[in-house]
Image: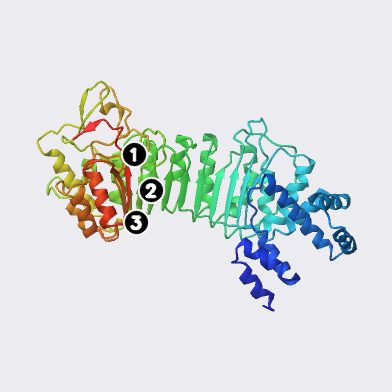
Amino acid sequence: MFDLPELLDMVFSVLSTQDLARCALVNKQWCDIATPHLWHTVSYLSGDRLKAFKRTVLEDFLRAQEYQDLRLKLEEAEQRRWPGQGSIKELATTKHTAEEFFSYFLKQCVNVRTLALDIVFPNELFYRVFKDIADNLAPNLRELSLKGPCDGSFFGTSSRWYLYFISRCSSNLEKLTIYSDPIPGYIADVGADLLPIADVKFPGLKELVLDHCWSKDELPMWDWFWKSCGNVERLELKTCRTDLTYDLAARIRTYLPKVNSIVFKDKMVRKAVTPLISACMGGWKTVRTQATLDRMSCKALVKHCGTLEVLEVKAILTFSSSTLQCVLSSSPGLKVLITIDDKWRRRRRIPYLEAKDFIDIHPLSNTLNPWASEKALKVLKTKITYIPRPDVSKYLGGGQRFDALTETYAGEGRHLQRRVLERLARFTNLEELCLGHDTMANIYPESLYEGGTNEDYQYDCLEMTLESGMSQLRNLKNLRVLDVRRMAQRIGIKEVQWMTRHWSKLQVIRGLHDDGDNLKAAEWLWKHSPMITVEVLSKAFIAWEF
């Protein structure tokens, strides 16, 4: 048995909840040390689990009182052999209030590091509870999420509720999330004497998530907070009213000198994206956006190519292909480019690269222009389109024949494929290559097909065969994942045999169909390379033929 509490604390910090519960039963010393670790996280409780949890808190409270004034009463109760939870609750509530139990419970939560708190319409009880939680839990937190009311009421949330709680946190806070009602207003009349705000610093705060549409009248109240965010590196924005965009951009420039990563959620107003992208003075390393980029946003984005390492964009209003070409050709540190959304939902304006833009041939030498990202890129997930495929035909509703793009000269499709593969071969450190997708998105502009089609399938794409030039990819020695979902590709046995010979690190192939050469290739892999995961998709609903 350990005699040093410090050693016990170190050991208990890495134990599971079940093991901690067993340790707490050894003796009083172990119980005192193990209990704070047990209260580290409380998962969602309901029904019988909630009743059991309440019983545990009550028992723990009474057990603590045993060492004070309730020793004799507890011993007497034990002699009467209480019949169950009701007896404990009856004894406890006759002598103590719910606030006392809650306060006791909070004091056991000294090891809580992550907290998500909903701020509801306050009354006197809410005020006391809010204060207790802030005073007891905030100083120990590493991650804090505050959510204002979003029930559609006409009340908003005063910033003082947020700022009081934040000011109770210690300098160890690492991540802060603030959600707020999108409708401006105030909950109650909260004065500085009720919720005093301390001026603190957060040198450890690295991540800031905002969905907070505070009114302009409240902006000065936040000045001390922004001044304490000098070490924030990642900023995530869920919504931002247009009238506050330029103020937020100014605060990024002034108070967030180290920020290099930004995330825009799909609720962002499109016009708000441009000034926020332009706000980073040191250059963005990571940009992830579900919001649509317009022409001005694209121009602002490409100015950060010198520092850009990760770009994930799900919708571009115009100039999709030229923007992506500029990013790939001008970003020496680019490691990840993702434009494909794998969520099963219909989206418009999916970014894609036209084959000719991706090839980027020097007009005089007929050779490929060198791109800055060739050595750095590790993940490429995008569609490469506008490749004529005379080998692919399909029949639309009513039996109308449809061809995937017409060649301007015989053999144009194969020629473009070889040059596209030549470009791909230059990304020698590539680990993931995803040219297909698993969404309901239309991949073409509506004008491409007369009458349009809602079918979610790629026809003017690479066929991924050795005859089309895939052997040029032999130097992709680090490739782990190949994704060709919902593509009119022709991968067969000889192609997968070639892959296993040249791509020794290959782990996953996604998107082979469940018939024809694709199925034979999958069966060969299952038999001869079982370590490679092969995901086969059904092609039964695709009305096409080779």
> Where is residue 84 drawn, in percent x and y?
79, 52
Q: Which mark is residue 311?
A: 2
* Viewer-nearest residue: 106 or 306: 106
* Viewer-nearest residue: 156 or 473: 473
Farthest residue toward the left? 410
Q: CA distance from mark 3 to mark 2?
A: 11 Å
Residue type pointed to by label 1: Pro
| Element type where label 2 sits in the image | strand
167, above or below 14, in the image: above
Q: Which mark is residue 351?
A: 1
Q: Nearer the viewer, mark 3 or mark 2?
A: 2
Ranked by sequence position, the earlier of labels 3 and 2 is 2
Q: CA distance from mark 1 to mark 3?
A: 21 Å
Q: Which residue is mark 3?
A: 333
Q: CA distance from mark 1 to mark 2?
A: 12 Å
Q: Disc 1 vs disc 2: Cβ atoms closer than 8 Å? A: no
Q: Residues within 10 Å of mark 1 (few under 14, many from 20)?
A: many
| Element type where label 1 sits in the image | loop
Locate the C terminus by quadrant.
top left
Residue at (49% x, 52% y) in the render: 234
Q: Disc 1 vs disc 3: Cβ atoms closer than 8 Å? A: no
> Where is residue 16 drawn, in percent x and y?
60, 63
Whether residue 348 appears in this view of the structure is yes
Q: Which mark is residue 537?
A: none
Residue type pointed to by label 3: Gly
Ranked by sequence position, the earlier of labels 1 and 3 is 3
